[in-house]
Amino acid sequence: FVDLVTAALYRAYDDKADIITISIGGAAAYTEDPRTIAIQRITNMGVYVTVALGNEGEGGLETVNMPGAAPDAMAIGSADSTYTLRYYIIAPDDSKIFYDPGTAFDPNGEANDGCVTSNPSMNGTVVLFTYTAQDICSVGYRCNLAFEAGARGCLIYNIGLTLGSYFIPTGSISLADAQRIISTVAANPSAIYTFTNLFGLSSMSTAGTPSTFSSLGLTGDLLIKPQITGIGGMVYSTISVSAAVQNSLPKPYMISSGTSMATPYVAGTLALFLASIGNPAPYTVSGYAQNGQCRPTFSLVKNIFQSTANAIQIYNSIVFATSAMQGAGLVNVYQAITAGTIFSPSELALNDTVRRATSYRVSVINIGNQTAIYTMSHSGAALATGKATGDDQL
């Protein structure tokens, strides 16, 4: 695997790629690796490299994938999208109720709500069952019983994505939407709800906050990862024709989540940045170009993008997420292209190899064409490791 990825990196360079984006990897917290050397050589030659950080966020610190741990790579974390596409039901008042379809499930299990079917009025209806984490009843089992009682559909509320029945369509809706349906049907038993196979834009409550699956830095030798964050949570994007067939999809599009989605997102912003300066060829990174327009080094571009990123907060909190989760923040390509100021260096790794340093020099560089006045301030972020009650950590 390592040799294949290394060979692919050199092949992409030989094919004259301007930007190489990698959405594969494997666990490796340390940076000694042939892919590290390949990325270093390629970026020194003026080609930019973005790499997915990994999707092992539940594992805690130092879950960076390789080659994302490579010092010269721009490792990308994930934040959730503002909107996603979901199927919807049309309510009697023409409002939309979004639902998540379930997949087939082996109809075995015991039940709570919906397990014992004694209601003969289920024939030809769509039934609505509640679900709690304490239930010992599977969703598939209760929906299969509803099918045997004549139901034509089954909705579960108080649950996320769910496994459903073999025999009838199964899906899940929110508690608030379920309560709306119950009150509407209680007032008007003949109210009509129309199920569709159409997508609608559904807002994400976690929009713009770090994705829970996104791996955390640092590397094993305490280098900062990720460098920056892109949108990777619940992204509607292209897939291969083969993947569409495997997932029984009519078109090669799918909603997916992962740093594998966030990484090409950031690679696209790098492409926009290069386009904004005329896309100088990679060889001009040496400082020579016939037209005088040279490509910025990848190190400088990382400084620009990190200096202009938007720091993001933990979900449902005013506290900024640790840099081990978000890097410099969520990429902002407009601010990167129009930047008048950059910080250099844009990250400080207080790792063991430089622990003897007693001070650091950070330069604020005006790259605009106007005089600027800066006021320095500081905003704290969450601890990477948490804080126990009574600890004197700041």
Image (cartoon, grey):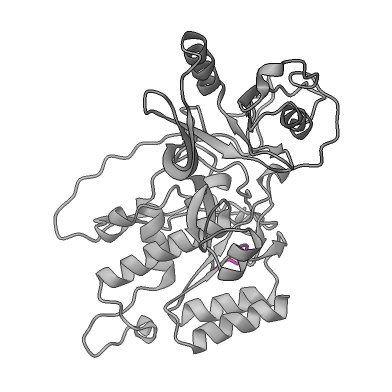
In the figure, residue 268 lies in which quadrant? bottom left
- Residue 231 image position (x, y, % from top left): 47, 51
Q: Is residue 82 visible?
A: no
Q: Does residue 235 appear left or right of residue 378 in this picture?
A: right
Identified at 39% across, 82% down, the residue is 282
At horizontal 43% and vertical 26% (from top left) the residue drawn is 91
Residue 311, percent from left and from top = 42, 42
Residue 147 pos. (x, y %): 72, 32
Which residue range is magenta in the image?
Answer: 68-72
Residue sitting at 42 percent across and 42 percent down? 200
Q: Does the rendering let one see residue 181?
A: yes
For the C terminus, the image quarter is top right
User: Magenta includes 70?
Assistant: yes
Q: Nearer the viewer, residue 235 or 178?
A: 178
Residue at 75% in and 35% down: 140
Quarter of the image where one finds residue 146: top right
**302 vs 97: above or below:** below
Q: From the image, which quarter does the N terminus lie in?
A: bottom right
| Vertical placement of residue 336 versus 279, above or below | above
Residue 375: image location, x then y, percent: 27, 39
- Taking depth in this image into account, of 176 and 181 the one nearest to the observer is 181
Left or right of residue 294, residue 37 in this image: right
Q: Nearer the viewer, residue 289 or 92?
A: 92
Q: Is residue 2 above or below residue 164?
A: below
> Is residue 9 rendered to the left or right of residue 372?
right
| 222 magenta-colored | no
Residue, far right: 109
Residue pushed farthest top? 187
Residue 206 versus residue 45 in the image, above or below: above
